[in-house]
Image (spheres, grey):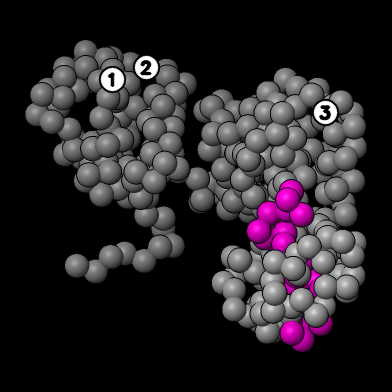
């Protein structure tokens, strides 16, 4: 009992009650609290009498049921949620619970570097690699994507974008197989809860360098033009500078070398150039003008790399919550 968390003790108590009474108690929790308790019920499955008695002793109002041997599992958790919130709301909660459990299954990989992960996943089917990468942090997954040769890289990316929700059983099998193969050498740390689909792939590509991004999108387009277009429409680009508020644009442009900025502006649309110039100090505008006049012809690859450097800054500031990028499908503010 001393090793159980508060959430686990709450789960034990609910498991030791009748479904009807437990449902009444569960209704008093928020969705987040209910998700945590339901996840513990799924994990625990069955409680021995001694543990149940210990938990019930802490809840004196339920002392009469201290001899009951509780039972957990997915069906019990689903039944409690349905009785508490209704079938539709319960389904949403269980979906998030399953995602949480799946993400935790791969926590042991969160400390591995790209080389270790690539070696560990070598020989696995693209669907298996996609399942693993979709449950890793985007920054970590992007390094693995970059290390894969084509067409394997495109196969994996396509699988991430098109796969549905995997069952917890399938996730557990893959996780246990990889854990056994790795010998448990990776130290676990907190891992974001992510699932497959286009958005996770976008997050992974957003953290890749310009060459990998272009190669992967071009390859995907040759296989599925509609999917590639969907991915591109969700990605941040150099042109997204025009979607920034003045304060946010100034944060992005702060500290960017004038040479990089001048190179990125080569061939850029006039609205983008205008946003850049308007959000620079007078001194930095003068430096930019000097660089622009002295720059001369530059390779397309240099322009792309300069723009990628700025885009990486936008992505990082947005991820940190310091700026907001208004997407095309978002409503505008009314002042």
User: Which element is circle 3 on?
Assistant: loop
Mark nearer the viewer, 3 or 1:
3
- Judging by the rendered image, the residue that carries numbered circle 3 is 184
The answer, for residue 11, to whether it is visible in the render is no
Neighbor class of circle 1 (other Cα within 10 Å; few <14, some 14-19, many 20+) is few
Mark 3 is surrounded, within 10 Å at the Cα level, by few (under 14), some (14 to 19) or many (20 or more) other residues, namely few
Q: Which quadrant would residue 32 be assigned to in this image?
A: bottom right
CB of mark 2 within 8 Å of CB of mark 3? no
Q: Which residues are magenta?
A: 1-21
Circle 1: element type = loop
Mark 2 and mark 1 in contact (Cβ < 8 Å)?
A: no
Viewer-proximal residue among 80 and 227: 80
Q: Secondary structure at mark 2?
A: loop
Query: Which quadrant is the N terminus positioned in?
Result: bottom right
Residue 193 location in percent, x, y? Answer: 64, 50
Residue assigned mark 1: 257
* Residue 9, position as x, y percentages in the image: 72, 62
Residue, x 53% and y 46% (percent of image)? 232
- The residue identified by callout 2 is 298
Seen at 90% across and 70% down, the residue is 69
**Residue 279 shows up from this direction:** yes
Report the quarter where the C terminus lies. bottom left
* 19 in magenta: yes
Q: Main secondary structure of the magenta part?
A: helix
């Amino acid at each position: 009992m001393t090793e159980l968390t508060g959430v686990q003790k709450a789960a034990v108590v609910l498991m030791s009650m009748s479904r009807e009474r437990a449902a009444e108690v569960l209704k008093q929790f928020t969705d987040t609290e209910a998700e945590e308790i339901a996840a513990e019920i799924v994990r625990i499955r069955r409680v021995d009498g001694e543990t149940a008695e210990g938990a019930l002793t802490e809840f004196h109002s339920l002392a009469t049921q201290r001899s009951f041997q509780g039972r957990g599992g997915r069906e019990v958790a689903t039944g409690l949620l349905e009785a508490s919130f209704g079938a539709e709301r319960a389904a949403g909660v269980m979906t998030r619970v399953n995602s949480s459990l799946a993400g935790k299954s791969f926590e042991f990989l969160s400390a591995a570097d790209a080389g270790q992960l690539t070696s560990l996943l070598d020989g696995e089917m693209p669907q298996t690699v996609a399942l693993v990468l979709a449950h890793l942090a985007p920054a970590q997954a992007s390094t693995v994507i970059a290390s894969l040769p084509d067409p394997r890289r495109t196969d994996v990316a396509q699988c991430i974008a098109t796969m549905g929700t995997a069952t917890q059983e399938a996730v557990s099998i893959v996780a246990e197989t990889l854990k056994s193969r790795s010998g448990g050498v990776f130290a676990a740390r907190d891992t974001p809860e992510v699932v497959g689909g286009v958005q996770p792939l976008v997050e992974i590509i957003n953290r890749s360098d310009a060459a990998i991004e272009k190669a992967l999108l071009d390859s995907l387009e040759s296989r599925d033009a509609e999917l590639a277009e969907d991915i591109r429409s969700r990605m941040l680009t150099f042109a997204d500078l025009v979607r920034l508020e003045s304060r946010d644009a100034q944060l992005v442009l702060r500290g960017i070398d004038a040479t990089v900025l001048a190179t990125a502006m080569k061939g850029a649309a006039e609205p983008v150039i205008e946003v850049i110039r308007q959000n620079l100090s007078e001194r930095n505008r003068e430096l930019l003008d000097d660089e622009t006049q002295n720059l001369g012809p530059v390779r397309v690859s240099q322009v792309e790399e300069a723009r990628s450097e700025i885009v990486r800054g936008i992505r990082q500031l947005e991820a940190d919550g310091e700026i907001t990028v208004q997407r095309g499908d978002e409503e505008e503010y009314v002042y």
